[in-house]
Image (cartoon, coloured by chain):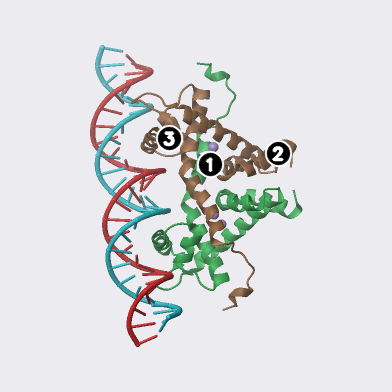
Chain colours: A brown, B green, C red, D cyan
Amino acid sequence: MTDPKSTDARLTDPTSQAAGFDRMRQARQTEIAEDYVELIADLIAEEGEARAVDLAARFGVSHATVNKTLARLQREDLVQTRPYRSIFLTEAGAAMAEGARRRHQIVLEFLTVIGVPAETAAIDAEGIEHHVSEETLAVFERIARQGL
Amino acid sequence: MTDPKSTDARLTDPTSQAAGFDRMRQARQTEIAEDYVELIADLIAEEGEARAVDLAARFGVSHATVNKTLARLQREDLVQTRPYRSIFLTEAGAAMAEGARRRHQIVLEFLTVIGVPAETAAIDAEGIEHHVSEETLAVFERIARQGL
DNA sequence: TGCAAAAGTTAGCATAGGCTAATAAATGCG
DNA sequence: CGCATTTATTAGCCTATGCTAACTTTTGCA
Ligand SMILES: [Mn+2]
Ligand SMILES: [Mn+2]
Ligand SMILES: [Mn+2]
Ligand SMILES: [Mn+2]
């Protein structure tokens, strides 16, 4: 065993390290909601309405799963559904969708500008977008505009 | 209602869009495992051993939660635990830790180099690291080395 | 050395997000 | 128009991740 004190300091203090993990757990809680409202907004804008079957196809999950998640989002006042009718966003849902769309767009453009191939950028942006603070997003946005 | 056809095309085809969401769901499944093995490796390197109580403090969750997650990681042959003894990584766990550490490091340096303040970079890197493909990581690494 | 504090374990509970399968409603076409 | 296809709902099951509370084991110090 090597002397514990002689290794290079990789660990920060426990409390501030916990901040990063805390943010990650928060993101886990909101990322699915964000993707749902964003996709619902896009479907309404482009197709005229959002149906569970389209969400299922685009998310790549079963329609039963979509249904259950929509029930949760309705409980949280993000969407409004009625049996056998198409899906609508509440004001809160529309606001969240707008924020998600903006973040998604900036992350995607940023990745593309720094040289990530389009298809990879699209895939990675889908995950990264939920973990970018406003501060980091501002840096991304500046680079996306000005070029690398 | 506006004409659906007249809006700007924001949607890609359902199948390729599903790829991004699929990657995100995979990341959800592995991100906690990655953070655990990475932190266990760091604790062993710096403190000489990893104990559940330290993991709990650093992750900011209860020690009971840590215990349950460790049981899962043991089932998946990533860690080796014995009652009331400290925690060890298996070969597979050590390999995963090494990969996670590398990705984490590159993402953190990248964010710092492009101008994100250190504390924010540390927090955001904790989440972003799990959603960056090797292709994107290569771009990050080049920029982290060469400067912006 | 004995005992209190620290650490670990276990049980029980909750929520979220997956699935399949069975059922029901709506739609649309021959 | 009626019936087949499409779409939606619901139930039941599973795993993962969180919690608190009760209990046990270890450890370290007075
Ligand atoms: Mn996303
Ligand atoms: Mn998105
Ligand atoms: Mn992480
Ligand atoms: Mn990490």
Residue bearing mark 2: A142
Q: Is residue B82 visible?
A: no
Marks 2 and 1: CB-CB under 8 Å?
no
- Picture residue at 45% right of the left edge, 39% below the top: A60
The CB of the residue at mark 1 lies under 8 Å from ligand 1: yes
Regarding residue A7, the answer to whether it shows in the image is yes
Disc 2, disc 3: CB below 8 Å? no
Q: Amino acid at mark 3?
A: Ala
Residue B20: mark in rendering: 1
Residue at the farthest right position: B146
Percent coordinates x, y for residue A128 in the rendering: 57, 44
Counting residues from the start of the chain, the first of labels 2 and 3 encountered is 3
Q: Specify the quarter for ligand 4.
A: bottom right
Q: Which mark, residue A56?
A: 3
- Where disc 3 sits, the SS reads helix
B130 or C20, which lies in front?
Answer: B130
Q: Nearer the viewer, residue A84 or B49?
A: B49
How far separated are the C-alphas under marks 2 and 3?
35 Å
Q: Nearer the viewer, residue A62 or B66?
A: B66
